[in-house]
Image: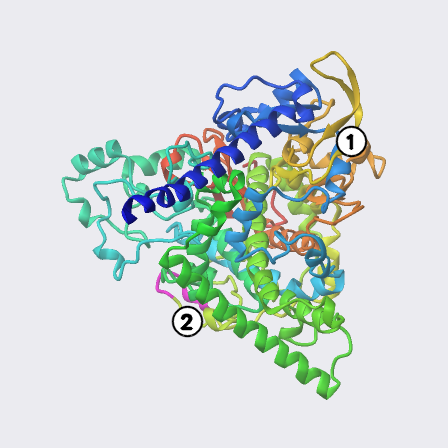
């Protein structure tokens, strides 16, 4: 009898759970059906479950937003999961209204969840809202950014030297992405150079569900991918030897350029003009390593040594880089559970992390606490000795990184406005996530654009060379060689390893390159054509192509251009309800226009008469910088969600372009089609080689001396 009495009780729990899910699901459908967005025009939905999301995952290559805008106007709706309507607008007045009210229009929960898993929690600048975000939003001054410029110069110069060594030695190799997990191999020469099975893709290219992963085309940059089977068989027949005896690349795989036929084809694509030394280099992972080192040292005083590790072909990464590789790889996974947790908040209580992620989180917390304690102790010692009374300035190495600035600012606040330890820890991950891939992506695309437009590159180089540098900074371009090119002296513990035999002794020289003077660096970042190139690059290749917001209260979003809804009514504003999602296509807004040249790389547009010509052309887009939304909105009304590190990024990009383009020439193979692949940031991929993942192959050679005529690339 007692057992029978327990049956109803046992059935109550699953029944209650079923009722919860049904009620939440029905509530979701009812809210979507009653949304005021239902009256707006938009494209038809090919799938009830996926809506328009399948075609949107490739929108940076298929011109989707432009086609939709031409068909439905500047403001329309598209469908998300389960047919949910989402507002998309390129109307400048509507975008300004939404972007200037960061606290009224925060990021949707599923976006915040993804960012939180990447940055270690909901207490960082990218994920915090309201009062928590207000006290975390310091404005890094121009003086503080200027004090970090020597770090930019140091890494840019080292990267230039490495590429020059590759060019002169004709031994090109591709390092792995520093924040990507790779199978550990004790001895690279023991690895099968041509495995029978394809390499495992990055976690970001996988999905744990039956849903198509909208980011499945993303694979991180990696060294020496598996060679196509047709090429392997052809090469083996010609050589009559085992693939195991093939020369090895740094990670153990055979290089395609080992084949004589491939070498001849490669030569045919290299311009011949008397300067023969030219190498095909995948610039993406090299720039990723250089910018990782920059954000490590300038952001929070940590020496990753990623660039030096690749230059010396050691194949090892720092403890913190390995940990963040686990965290970022896990965060980029696309899961059905992420969407279900938005629909059914109760499921958030069942989140679990695997052991690898837990261990990685423990490592980042341990190292982060050590970095924070070092800076707090140094700042306390300064206050006691009365050596420093202000935050700004370049007094010591500890004073100039962003974490020190943040801690100093935090100490000076009232106790109620100070950040907790967890909040400061989140900022370390935020600095890394926001300041690493975005800069490397922007620099990669700019070098690509310069490689496709040799006349722009030539004009830029002429301007860069107009700034005279003392000989210790940069040798005469004609004298750059494996025997004479200087190198940056090891400035970090991670770069003090003995030089690899792969690099010439000149590149491991201990000759110190003096730090550029503030006056010189100030002149560099204000060069007009360099500024125009950077503006045009960030306009045409925005690292973050789309941002999403969600309405938290009923609102009427004003429109600069009225639209006609599905009922035939003219609308000068759009009504939104709580929970309505709005997409702002940043990249599309940067390139949409009526002139017809918006999709062309044309830095001269920024030098036209009229200081605000480009802003007027975009009819009032109130961006933080250059009348663009690349760094977010620039006129906050209630909540500023724009990029606090935009000055940092601009200075870093300009210094890298100065050092690299002044002494190196870049060209792109016109036969190679490069596509954009988006996974948090926009990265390049060769359309015909999707199996090789993200890459940007460019031909790099030593620039001609100023006295000689620079040949066409």
Seen as rendered, the residue at the extreme right is 610
Render colour scheme: rainbow
Q: Residue at x 63, y 49 (%)?
A: 706
Residue 567 drawn at (x, y percent): 72, 12
Secondary structure beneath label 2? loop
Please give the label number shown on residue 556: 1
Query: Count the marks: how many?
Result: 2
Quarter of the image for residue 524 reads bottom right
| Region in magenta | 500-508
On screen, 641 above or below 612?
below
Task: Answer with left or right where residue 641 lies relative to residue 304.
Answer: right
Residue 611 at what x, y percent from top left?
A: 84, 39
Whole-percent x, y for residue 665 in the image: 55, 45
Residue depicted at x 32% and y 36%: 262
The furthest residue to the top: 568
- Relative vertical location of residue 388 with respect to residue 490 in this rendering, above or below: below
> Does the image show residue 114?
yes
Residue 372 position in % (x across, y down)? 58, 72
If you read the primary sequence from the N terminus, does the residue marked by circle 1 or circle 2 appear first?
2
Mark 1, secondary structure of its residue: strand
Q: In this orientation, does residue 703 appear? A: no
Quadrant hosting residue 423: bottom right
Decide whether residue 106 is among the magenta residues: no
Is residue 203 shown above or below 96? below
- Horizontal relation, residue 709 to residue 505: left or right: right
Drawn side of residue 682 relative to residue 382, left or right: left
**Residue annotated with mark 2:** 497
Label 2 crowd bin: few (<14), some (14–19), many (20+), radius 10 Å: some
């Amino acid at each position: 009898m007692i057992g029978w009495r327990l049956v109803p009780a046992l059935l109550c729990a699953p029944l209650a759970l079923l009722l919860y899910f049904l009620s939440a699901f029905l509530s979701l459908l009812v809210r979507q059906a009653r949304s005021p967005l239902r009256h707006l025009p938009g494209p038809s939905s090919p799938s009830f479950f996926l809506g328009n999301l399948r075609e949107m995952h490739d929108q940076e290559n298929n011109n989707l937003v432009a086609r939709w805008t031409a068909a439905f106007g500047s403001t329309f709706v598209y469908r998300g999961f389960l047919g949910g309507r989402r507002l998309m607008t390129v109307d400048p007045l509507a975008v300004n209204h939404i972007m200037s009210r960061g606290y009224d229009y925060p990021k949707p929960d599923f976006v915040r969840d993804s960012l939180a898993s990447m940055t270690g929690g909901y207490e960082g600048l990218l994920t915090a809202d309201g009062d928590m975000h207000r006290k975390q939003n310091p404005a890094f001054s121009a003086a503080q950014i200027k004090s970090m410029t020597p770090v930019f110069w140091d890494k840019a110069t080292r990267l230039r030297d490495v590429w020059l060594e590759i060019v002169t030695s004709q031994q090109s190799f591709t390092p792995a992405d520093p924040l990507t997990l790779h199978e550990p191999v004790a001895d690279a020469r023991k690895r099968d150079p041509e495995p029978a099975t394809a390499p495992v893709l990055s976690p970001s290219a996988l999905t744990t569900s039956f849903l198509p992963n909208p980011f499945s085309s993303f694979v991180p940059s990696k060294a020496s991918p598996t060679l196509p089977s047709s090429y392997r068989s052809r090469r083996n027949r010609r050589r009559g030897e085992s693939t195991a005896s093939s020369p090895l690349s740094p990670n153990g795989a055979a290089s395609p350029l080992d084949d004589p036929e491939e070498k001849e084809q490669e030569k045919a694509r290299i311009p011949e003009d008397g300067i023969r030394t030219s190498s095909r280099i995948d610039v993406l992972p090299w720039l990723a390593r250089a910018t990782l080192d920059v954000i490590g040292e300038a952001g929070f005083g940590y020496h990753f040594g990623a660039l030096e590790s690749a230059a010396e072909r050691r194949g090892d990464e720092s403890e913190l880089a390995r940990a963040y590789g686990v965290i970022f790889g896990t965060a980029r996974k696309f899961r059905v559970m992420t969407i279900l947790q938005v629909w059914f908040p109760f499921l958030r209580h069942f989140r679990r992390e695997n052991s690898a992620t837990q261990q990685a989180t423990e490592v980042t917390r341990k190292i982060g606490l050590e970095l924070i304690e070092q800076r707090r102790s140094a700042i306390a010692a300064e206050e006691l000795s009365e050596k420093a009374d202000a935050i700004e300035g370049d007094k010591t190495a500890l004073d100039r990184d962003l974490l020190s600035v943040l801690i100093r600012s935090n100490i000076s606040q009232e106790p109620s406005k100070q950040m907790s330890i967890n909040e400061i820890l989140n900022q370390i991950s935020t600095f890394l996530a926001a300041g690493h891939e975005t800069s490397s992506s922007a620099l990669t695309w700019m070098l690509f654009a310069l490689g496709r437009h040799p006349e722009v590159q030539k004009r830029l180089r002429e301007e860069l060379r107009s700034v005279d540098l003392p000989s210790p900074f940069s040798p005469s371009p004609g004298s750059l060689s494996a025997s004479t090119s200087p190198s940056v002296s090891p400035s970090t513990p991670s770069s003090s390893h003995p030089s690899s035999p792969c690099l010439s002794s000149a590149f491991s020289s201990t000759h110190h390159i003096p730090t550029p003077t503030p006056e010189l660096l100030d002149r560099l970042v204000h060069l007009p054509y360099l500024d125009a190139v950077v503006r045009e690059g960030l306009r045409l290749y925005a690292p973050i192509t789309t941002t999403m917001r969600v309405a938290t209260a009923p609102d009427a979003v004003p429109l600069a251009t009225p639209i006609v809804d599905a009922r035939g009514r003219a609308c000068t504003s759009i009504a939104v309800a709580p929970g309505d999602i709005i997409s702002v296509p940043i990249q599309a807004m940067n390139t949409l226009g009526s002139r017809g040249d918006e999709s062309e790389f044309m830095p001269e547009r920024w030098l036209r008469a009229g200081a605000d010509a480009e802003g007027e052309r975009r009819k009032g887009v109130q961006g933080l910088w250059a009348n663009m939304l690349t760094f977010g909105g620039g006129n906050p009304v209630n909540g500023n969600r724009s990029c606090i590190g935009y000055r940092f990024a601009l200075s870093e990009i300009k210094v890298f372009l100065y050092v690299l383009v002044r002494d190196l020439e870049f060209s792109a193979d016109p036969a190679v089609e490069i596509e954009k692949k988006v996974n948090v940031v926009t990265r390049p991929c060769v359309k015909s080689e999707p199996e090789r993942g993200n890459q940007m192959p460019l031909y790099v050679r030593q620039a001609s001396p100023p006295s000689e005529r620079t040949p066409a690339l």
